[in-house]
Amino acid sequence: MTRPKFLPDNFTLALVGTVILASLLPCRGAAAVGFNWLTNIAVGLLFFLHGAKLSREAIVSGMTHWRLHIVVLLSTFALFPLLGLALKPVLTPLVTPALYMGVLFLCTLPSTVQSSIAFTSIAKGNVPAAVCAASASSLLGIFITPALVGLVVTDGSGHAGSAWHTVGNIVLQLLVPFIAGQLLRPVISKWLDKNRSVLRFVDQGSILLVVYVAFSEAVNEGIWHTISLQTLGGLVVVNVVLLALALGVTAFASKRLGFNRADQITIIFCGSKKSLASGIPMAKVIFASHAVGAVVLPLMLFHQIQLMTCAVLAQRWGARDTSGEQAPQPDGEGARAQVR
Protein backbone atom coordinates (compact mmCIF):
# COMPACT_ATOMS: atom_id res chain seq x y z
CA MET A 1 0.00 0.00 0.00
CA THR A 2 1.31 3.45 -0.92
CA ARG A 3 1.77 5.81 2.00
CA PRO A 4 -0.38 8.99 1.72
CA LYS A 5 1.95 11.83 0.72
CA PHE A 6 1.07 14.01 3.72
CA LEU A 7 1.90 11.35 6.32
CA PRO A 8 5.37 11.35 7.91
CA ASP A 9 7.89 8.80 6.65
CA ASN A 10 9.27 6.00 8.80
CA PHE A 11 12.38 7.96 9.74
CA THR A 12 10.33 10.92 10.96
CA LEU A 13 8.24 8.52 13.04
CA ALA A 14 11.48 7.08 14.42
CA LEU A 15 12.61 10.60 15.36
CA VAL A 16 9.36 11.22 17.20
CA GLY A 17 9.69 7.85 18.94
CA THR A 18 13.26 8.71 19.97
CA VAL A 19 12.14 12.01 21.50
CA ILE A 20 9.38 10.17 23.41
CA LEU A 21 11.87 7.54 24.61
CA ALA A 22 14.30 10.22 25.78
CA SER A 23 11.44 12.01 27.54
CA LEU A 24 10.39 8.87 29.41
CA LEU A 25 13.78 7.15 29.85
CA PRO A 26 16.58 9.73 29.56
CA CYS A 27 20.15 8.48 29.90
CA ARG A 28 22.04 9.71 32.94
CA GLY A 29 25.42 9.37 34.57
CA ALA A 30 27.71 6.65 33.22
CA ALA A 31 25.12 5.69 30.58
CA ALA A 32 25.12 9.25 29.24
CA VAL A 33 28.93 9.22 29.00
CA GLY A 34 28.81 5.93 27.08
CA PHE A 35 26.14 7.20 24.70
CA ASN A 36 28.18 10.37 24.07
CA TRP A 37 31.19 8.29 23.01
CA LEU A 38 28.96 6.13 20.83
CA THR A 39 27.42 9.15 19.08
CA ASN A 40 30.87 10.66 18.42
CA ILE A 41 31.98 7.43 16.76
CA ALA A 42 28.72 7.14 14.77
CA VAL A 43 28.94 10.74 13.51
CA GLY A 44 32.57 10.28 12.44
CA LEU A 45 31.64 7.06 10.62
CA LEU A 46 28.71 8.83 8.96
CA PHE A 47 30.92 11.55 7.43
CA PHE A 48 33.56 8.99 6.49
CA LEU A 49 30.99 6.99 4.50
CA HIS A 50 29.56 10.13 2.88
CA GLY A 51 33.07 11.09 1.82
CA ALA A 52 33.59 7.65 0.30
CA LYS A 53 30.23 7.79 -1.51
CA LEU A 54 30.51 11.27 -3.06
CA SER A 55 31.72 11.15 -6.65
CA ARG A 56 34.42 13.68 -7.53
CA GLU A 57 33.35 13.46 -11.16
CA ALA A 58 29.83 14.61 -10.27
CA ILE A 59 31.25 17.63 -8.44
CA VAL A 60 33.61 18.58 -11.27
CA SER A 61 30.89 18.20 -13.91
CA GLY A 62 28.63 20.70 -12.17
CA MET A 63 31.23 23.22 -11.02
CA THR A 64 31.16 25.13 -14.31
CA HIS A 65 27.64 26.41 -13.59
CA TRP A 66 29.02 29.02 -11.22
CA ARG A 67 26.11 31.52 -11.41
CA LEU A 68 23.66 28.88 -10.21
CA HIS A 69 25.94 27.80 -7.37
CA ILE A 70 26.45 31.37 -6.19
CA VAL A 71 22.68 31.92 -6.02
CA VAL A 72 22.18 28.69 -4.05
CA LEU A 73 24.98 29.53 -1.60
CA LEU A 74 23.69 33.08 -1.13
CA SER A 75 20.21 31.75 -0.42
CA THR A 76 21.52 29.14 2.02
CA PHE A 77 24.09 31.18 3.92
CA ALA A 78 22.92 34.80 3.46
CA LEU A 79 19.17 34.91 2.81
CA PHE A 80 18.21 32.54 5.62
CA PRO A 81 20.29 34.23 8.36
CA LEU A 82 19.02 37.65 7.26
CA LEU A 83 15.43 36.38 7.39
CA GLY A 84 15.98 34.92 10.84
CA LEU A 85 17.33 38.23 12.14
CA ALA A 86 14.88 40.48 10.29
CA LEU A 87 11.87 38.50 11.51
CA LYS A 88 12.96 38.58 15.16
CA PRO A 89 10.19 41.01 16.26
CA VAL A 90 7.60 38.67 14.71
CA LEU A 91 9.17 35.36 15.76
CA THR A 92 10.22 35.97 19.36
CA PRO A 93 6.64 36.38 20.70
CA LEU A 94 5.84 32.93 19.27
CA VAL A 95 8.76 30.94 20.73
CA THR A 96 11.06 30.91 23.75
CA PRO A 97 14.54 32.49 23.60
CA ALA A 98 16.12 29.02 23.49
CA LEU A 99 13.93 27.98 20.55
CA TYR A 100 14.63 31.24 18.73
CA MET A 101 18.34 30.46 19.14
CA GLY A 102 17.52 27.12 17.49
CA VAL A 103 15.74 28.93 14.65
CA LEU A 104 18.82 31.10 14.06
CA PHE A 105 21.00 27.98 14.11
CA LEU A 106 18.66 26.41 11.54
CA CYS A 107 19.15 29.48 9.34
CA THR A 108 22.94 29.02 9.32
CA LEU A 109 22.94 25.38 8.18
CA PRO A 110 23.90 24.03 4.73
CA SER A 111 21.41 22.60 2.27
CA THR A 112 20.41 18.96 2.18
CA VAL A 113 22.06 16.66 -0.35
CA GLN A 114 19.84 13.62 -0.92
CA SER A 115 16.41 15.29 -0.85
CA SER A 116 17.53 18.35 -2.88
CA ILE A 117 18.77 16.05 -5.65
CA ALA A 118 15.75 13.75 -5.42
CA PHE A 119 13.19 16.56 -5.63
CA THR A 120 15.11 18.25 -8.46
CA SER A 121 15.02 14.98 -10.39
CA ILE A 122 11.27 14.46 -9.78
CA ALA A 123 10.53 18.03 -10.91
CA LYS A 124 12.73 17.60 -14.04
CA GLY A 125 15.33 20.14 -12.99
CA ASN A 126 19.08 20.25 -13.62
CA VAL A 127 20.22 17.19 -11.65
CA PRO A 128 24.03 17.45 -12.26
CA ALA A 129 23.95 21.07 -11.07
CA ALA A 130 21.88 20.01 -8.04
CA VAL A 131 24.47 17.35 -7.15
CA CYS A 132 27.24 19.95 -7.29
CA ALA A 133 25.31 22.74 -5.54
CA ALA A 134 24.06 20.56 -2.68
CA SER A 135 27.44 18.88 -2.20
CA ALA A 136 29.28 22.21 -2.20
CA SER A 137 26.80 23.61 0.32
CA SER A 138 27.31 20.61 2.60
CA LEU A 139 31.11 20.83 2.44
CA LEU A 140 31.35 24.61 2.81
CA GLY A 141 28.86 24.46 5.67
CA ILE A 142 31.49 22.74 7.82
CA PHE A 143 33.32 26.09 7.87
CA ILE A 144 30.57 28.64 7.15
CA THR A 145 28.01 27.41 9.69
CA PRO A 146 30.28 27.80 12.76
CA ALA A 147 31.31 31.26 11.54
CA LEU A 148 27.69 32.32 11.07
CA VAL A 149 26.69 30.89 14.44
CA GLY A 150 29.39 33.00 16.03
CA LEU A 151 27.97 36.09 14.30
CA VAL A 152 24.20 35.71 14.57
CA VAL A 153 23.34 33.20 17.30
CA THR A 154 23.12 34.35 20.90
CA ASP A 155 22.48 32.34 24.03
CA GLY A 156 19.51 34.48 25.05
CA SER A 157 21.54 36.82 27.22
CA GLY A 158 23.16 38.80 24.43
CA HIS A 159 26.39 36.82 24.18
CA ALA A 160 27.47 35.54 20.80
CA GLY A 161 27.72 31.79 20.34
CA SER A 162 31.16 30.26 20.94
CA ALA A 163 31.23 28.54 17.56
CA TRP A 164 34.53 30.16 16.52
CA HIS A 165 36.23 28.14 19.25
CA THR A 166 34.68 24.91 17.98
CA VAL A 167 35.82 25.10 14.35
CA GLY A 168 38.71 22.81 15.27
CA ASN A 169 36.27 20.27 16.71
CA ILE A 170 34.08 20.54 13.61
CA VAL A 171 37.07 19.88 11.37
CA LEU A 172 38.26 16.98 13.52
CA GLN A 173 34.89 15.25 13.91
CA LEU A 174 33.35 15.96 10.51
CA LEU A 175 35.85 17.11 7.86
CA VAL A 176 38.74 14.76 8.68
CA PRO A 177 36.55 11.62 8.43
CA PHE A 178 35.04 13.02 5.21
CA ILE A 179 38.47 13.54 3.63
CA ALA A 180 39.55 10.09 4.79
CA GLY A 181 36.48 8.67 3.05
CA GLN A 182 37.34 10.54 -0.14
CA LEU A 183 40.89 9.21 -0.06
CA LEU A 184 39.68 5.64 0.44
CA ARG A 185 36.88 5.96 -2.12
CA PRO A 186 38.75 3.94 -4.80
CA VAL A 187 39.06 1.08 -2.31
CA ILE A 188 35.59 0.92 -0.77
CA SER A 189 33.24 2.64 -3.26
CA LYS A 190 32.27 -0.63 -4.98
CA TRP A 191 31.50 -2.23 -1.63
CA LEU A 192 29.36 0.78 -0.67
CA ASP A 193 27.46 0.60 -3.97
CA LYS A 194 26.59 -3.01 -3.20
CA ASN A 195 25.73 -2.29 0.44
CA ARG A 196 23.77 0.97 0.33
CA SER A 197 21.76 -0.16 3.34
CA VAL A 198 24.90 0.21 5.48
CA LEU A 199 25.15 3.93 4.72
CA ARG A 200 21.44 4.39 5.34
CA PHE A 201 21.69 2.55 8.66
CA VAL A 202 24.66 4.67 9.80
CA ASP A 203 23.02 7.86 8.46
CA GLN A 204 19.74 7.40 10.28
CA GLY A 205 21.19 5.59 13.28
CA SER A 206 23.70 8.35 14.04
CA ILE A 207 20.98 11.01 13.90
CA LEU A 208 18.72 8.99 16.19
CA LEU A 209 21.59 8.52 18.65
CA VAL A 210 22.39 12.24 18.72
CA VAL A 211 18.69 13.11 19.15
CA TYR A 212 18.34 10.62 22.01
CA VAL A 213 21.41 11.93 23.85
CA ALA A 214 20.47 15.58 23.19
CA PHE A 215 16.90 15.21 24.38
CA SER A 216 17.96 13.10 27.36
CA GLU A 217 20.13 15.99 28.49
CA ALA A 218 17.36 18.47 27.71
CA VAL A 219 14.81 16.42 29.68
CA ASN A 220 17.22 16.22 32.62
CA GLU A 221 17.41 20.03 32.43
CA GLY A 222 13.58 20.32 32.36
CA ILE A 223 12.91 21.21 28.70
CA TRP A 224 9.28 20.05 28.75
CA HIS A 225 8.55 22.28 31.73
CA THR A 226 9.50 25.33 29.67
CA ILE A 227 7.92 24.47 26.28
CA SER A 228 4.13 24.44 26.06
CA LEU A 229 1.86 23.17 23.28
CA GLN A 230 1.21 26.78 22.36
CA THR A 231 4.95 27.36 21.97
CA LEU A 232 5.28 24.26 19.78
CA GLY A 233 2.44 25.59 17.62
CA GLY A 234 4.24 28.91 17.35
CA LEU A 235 7.40 27.10 16.30
CA VAL A 236 5.52 25.35 13.49
CA VAL A 237 4.25 28.74 12.28
CA VAL A 238 7.81 30.15 12.39
CA ASN A 239 9.13 27.27 10.28
CA VAL A 240 6.31 27.57 7.74
CA VAL A 241 6.95 31.31 7.36
CA LEU A 242 10.70 30.77 6.86
CA LEU A 243 10.20 28.06 4.26
CA ALA A 244 7.52 30.03 2.38
CA LEU A 245 9.75 33.11 2.19
CA ALA A 246 12.75 31.06 1.04
CA LEU A 247 10.72 29.34 -1.67
CA GLY A 248 9.22 32.62 -2.85
CA VAL A 249 12.51 34.55 -2.91
CA THR A 250 14.46 31.79 -4.71
CA ALA A 251 11.68 31.42 -7.31
CA PHE A 252 11.51 35.18 -7.92
CA ALA A 253 15.29 35.71 -7.99
CA SER A 254 16.06 32.77 -10.27
CA LYS A 255 13.44 33.94 -12.75
CA ARG A 256 14.61 37.56 -12.74
CA LEU A 257 18.23 36.47 -13.20
CA GLY A 258 17.29 34.72 -16.44
CA PHE A 259 17.84 31.07 -15.52
CA ASN A 260 15.98 28.48 -17.57
CA ARG A 261 13.23 26.38 -16.04
CA ALA A 262 15.47 23.42 -15.13
CA ASP A 263 17.95 25.69 -13.36
CA GLN A 264 15.16 27.56 -11.57
CA ILE A 265 13.90 24.26 -10.15
CA THR A 266 17.41 23.41 -8.98
CA ILE A 267 17.85 26.79 -7.28
CA ILE A 268 14.47 26.56 -5.55
CA PHE A 269 15.02 23.09 -4.13
CA CYS A 270 18.72 23.44 -3.25
CA GLY A 271 18.40 26.99 -1.91
CA SER A 272 15.36 26.50 0.34
CA LYS A 273 16.39 23.44 2.37
CA LYS A 274 18.32 22.84 5.56
CA SER A 275 20.19 19.65 6.39
CA LEU A 276 19.10 17.57 9.36
CA ALA A 277 21.95 15.11 8.74
CA SER A 278 24.59 17.87 9.05
CA GLY A 279 22.74 20.08 11.49
CA ILE A 280 22.28 17.69 14.39
CA PRO A 281 25.95 16.58 14.53
CA MET A 282 27.05 20.23 14.23
CA ALA A 283 24.74 21.26 17.07
CA LYS A 284 26.28 18.59 19.25
CA VAL A 285 29.76 20.00 18.60
CA ILE A 286 28.90 23.71 18.74
CA PHE A 287 26.49 24.02 21.66
CA ALA A 288 26.66 23.00 25.31
CA SER A 289 25.06 19.60 25.89
CA HIS A 290 22.17 20.98 27.96
CA ALA A 291 21.18 23.35 25.11
CA VAL A 292 21.27 20.91 22.18
CA GLY A 293 17.73 19.57 22.68
CA ALA A 294 16.08 22.98 22.32
CA VAL A 295 18.45 23.99 19.53
CA VAL A 296 17.65 21.00 17.28
CA LEU A 297 13.87 21.00 17.86
CA PRO A 298 13.20 23.77 15.26
CA LEU A 299 15.38 21.87 12.77
CA MET A 300 13.50 18.60 13.30
CA LEU A 301 10.17 20.31 12.63
CA PHE A 302 11.53 22.25 9.64
CA HIS A 303 12.87 18.99 8.19
CA GLN A 304 9.44 17.39 8.04
CA ILE A 305 7.71 20.57 6.80
CA GLN A 306 10.23 21.05 3.96
CA LEU A 307 9.92 17.40 2.89
CA MET A 308 6.11 17.47 2.72
CA THR A 309 5.97 20.86 0.98
CA CYS A 310 8.70 20.14 -1.56
CA ALA A 311 7.29 16.68 -2.31
CA VAL A 312 4.02 18.30 -3.39
CA LEU A 313 5.80 20.96 -5.48
CA ALA A 314 8.14 18.44 -7.14
CA GLN A 315 5.28 16.13 -8.11
CA ARG A 316 3.22 19.01 -9.54
CA TRP A 317 6.09 20.49 -11.54
CA GLY A 318 7.34 17.13 -12.74
CA ALA A 319 3.90 16.18 -14.06
CA ARG A 320 3.64 19.29 -16.24
CA ASP A 321 4.40 19.55 -19.94
CA THR A 322 7.44 21.82 -19.72
CA SER A 323 7.39 23.03 -23.33
CA GLY A 324 6.98 26.78 -23.44
CA GLU A 325 5.95 26.91 -19.80
CA GLN A 326 6.74 29.67 -17.37
CA ALA A 327 9.07 29.04 -14.47
CA PRO A 328 7.61 27.49 -11.31
CA GLN A 329 6.55 30.02 -8.69
CA PRO A 330 5.74 28.75 -5.18
CA ASP A 331 4.01 32.02 -4.34
CA GLY A 332 1.68 31.61 -7.31
CA GLU A 333 0.26 28.49 -8.87
CA GLY A 334 2.54 26.20 -6.85
CA ALA A 335 1.28 27.66 -3.60
CA ARG A 336 -2.32 27.17 -4.66
CA ALA A 337 -1.50 23.59 -5.60
CA GLN A 338 -0.31 22.98 -2.05
CA VAL A 339 -3.62 23.99 -0.51
CA ARG A 340 -5.73 21.99 -2.89
Image: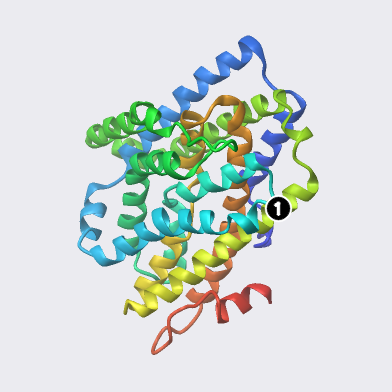
In the picture, the quarter occupied by the N terminus is: bottom right
The answer to whether residue 117 of the structure is visible from this angle is no
Q: Quadrant of residue 157?
A: top right
Percent x, y for residue 284? 51, 30
Q: Quadrant of residue 308?
A: bottom right
Percent x, y for residue 52? 31, 37
Q: Residue furthest front?
A: 158
Residue drawn 53% across and 54% down?
A: 84
Residue drawn 36% across and 38% down?
A: 192
Q: Residue furthest top?
A: 30
Report the number of discs.
1
In this view, the residue in front, 296 or 317, is 296
Q: Disc 1 marks which residue? A: 94
In this view, the residue in front, 239 or 207, is 239
Q: Residue furthest bottom?
A: 324
In the picture, the quarter occupied by the C terminus is: bottom right
Q: Is residue 200 above or below residue 65?
A: above
Q: Is residue 84 above or below residue 28?
A: below
Residue drawn 65% across and 62% down?
A: 5
Q: Is residue 153 above or below residue 262?
A: above
Q: Is residue 147 above or below residue 119?
A: above
Percent x, y for residue 124? 41, 72
In this view, the residue in front, 167 or 46, is 167
Q: Is residue 14 left or right of residue 311?
A: right
The answer to whether residue 174 of the structure is visible from this angle is yes
User: What's the amino acid at mark 1?
Assistant: Leu
How crowded pointer 1 is (Cα within 10 Å; few <14, some 14-19, many 20+) is rated as many
Percent x, y for residue 235? 68, 51
**What is the secondary structure assignment of the residue under circle 1?**
loop
